[in-house]
Amino acid sequence: MRKQDYFREVLLQWFEKNRRSFPWREEGIGYYKTIISEILLQRTKAETVAKYYAFFFEKYPHWDALMGATLVELEDMMKPLGLHRQRATRLYTLAQGMKKRLATREYTPKIKPAELQEAGFSGLYLRNAYELFILNKRKPLLDVNMSRLLKRYFSPGEYVDVRHDKAIQSMANQIVQTKDCKTLNWAILDYAATVCTAKAPACNNCQLNVACTEFSRKKGYNPRKKWIITAIYEQ
């Protein structure tokens, strides 16, 4: 079994029993809640957004409600998540773009990539999230958490901002080329958040450690010898 295949298989099996439950992962929530949730998740912990999710969508359950919000109202709504002025300005710009399209009879629930960019949502993560959830393409939800797990498992090295790390971008894109792409993305994010954490990762209890390059390095193993890994992959 190849190292990439082992990575996918272990994480998907782990995810079946250990997945975190979030409202934006539910089936049938629609394009509006899907894309707004990903916007709220930018640079914010999932647990924080989960606590705020019902409150936000109670106030703005659909595009019409968000299009009627003032910038000041959105700033007040965004305060619990931080970066409230930046978030509010972007959401307001996005909503006004949808309002303009509605006025010209060009309305569709799917946001256009150009509209995200105009609203300031041009980052790698959100662009990939849009393609994954809206366009149904196989794209990685690449953030610092996914980057950390991939880097430790495949090729430990100095931290580089994921926006500029072409190697980790390429690796992430390769990993998610599977029919279980969406589920694998969530599995990677959950594993990085609960097992392969930034500080004090649970390496000894990690189900990936037998093939993890960083774990082998810490234990003083020579990865070139492929000790037990080879036996597992070649079964």
Image (cartoon, rainbow, N blue to C red):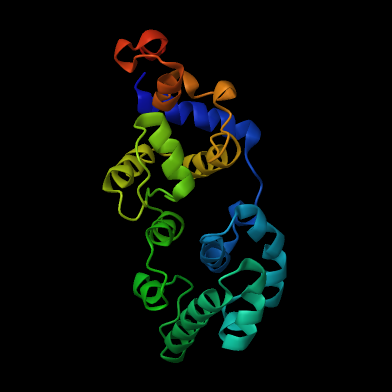
Say whether residue 27 is visible.
no
Against 176, residue 4 (above or below) is above
- Front residue of this view, candidates 168 and 31: 168
- Front residue of this view, candidates 103 and 230: 230
Image quarter in which the N terminus is found: top left
Residue 218 position within the rendered picture, expressed as x and y whole percent measured from the top left:
45, 22
- Front residue of this view, candidates 197 and 169: 197
Residue 47 position within the rendered picture, expressed as x and y whole percent measured from the top left:
66, 53
Q: In which quarter of the image is residue 217?
A: top left
Against 158, residue 210 (above or below) is above
The residue at 39%/25% (across/down) is 213
- 27 on left or right of 220: right
Residue 26 position within the rendered picture, expressed as x and y whole percent measured from the top left:
62, 53
Q: Quadrant of residue 216?
A: top left
The residue at 46%/17% (across/down) is 219
Against 147, residue 229 (above or below) is above
The residue at 50%/39% (across/down) is 188
Q: Quadrant of residue 81?
A: bottom right
Numbered label tally:
0
Say whether residue 38 is visible.
yes
Residue ranking furthest to the bottom: 103
